[in-house]
Image: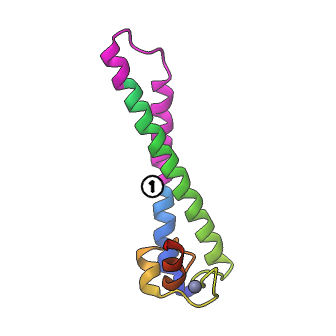
Amino acid sequence: MKKYAAIRQKLLQRRELLVKRMQEIAQQQQRAEGPLSQDFAEQATEREHEEVLDALGEAGRLELSQINRTLERIDSDEYGICAECGEPIAEARLEVLPNSEYCISCAERHDH
Ligand SMILES: [Zn+2]
């Protein structure tokens, strides 16, 4: 859909960035898998570092799958339509939350 070309482009760039970041995280995780340091304080730091990496990796994976789903919806012309009520989603909302599948009123209903 031509209408969402700009959003699509933005998502593709974001995906590229995420993929790169995930690769860096995976590399750091591999490095972190080595034997723990003998020093207790060091061990604590290493464990914390691993936890941060895991959290980053998890968040990245989640966002990647959201982006992939959004791109599929754009390509199949389902994008911009609320998955619940079928009403068009405001473009201003899509610009701020490009992965949003719901219109504002449905999203607000979910929050309550
Ligand atoms: Zn809706």
Image coordinates of residue 24 in percent, x first then y, are: 45, 40
> In percent of the image, x 38 and y 24: which residue is there?
46
Residue type at mark 1?
A: Leu
Query: Residue extending furthest right?
Result: 76
Residue 51 lies in the magenta stretch: no
Q: Which residues are magenta?
A: 17-45
- The quadrant the N terminus occupies is bottom right
Q: Quadrant of ligand 1?
A: bottom right
- Give the number of marks: 1
Residue 34 lies in the magenta stretch: yes
- Give above or below for 6 relative to 46: below
> In percent of the image, x 57 and y 63: which residue is there?
66
Image coordinates of residue 16 in percent, x first then y, are: 49, 57
Mark 1: few/some/many CA within 10 Å (<14, 14-19, 20+)? few
Image coordinates of residue 4 in percent, x first then y, are: 53, 82
- Give above or below for 48 relative to 74: above
Q: Which residue is mark 1?
A: 17
Query: Residue extending furthest left?
Result: 41
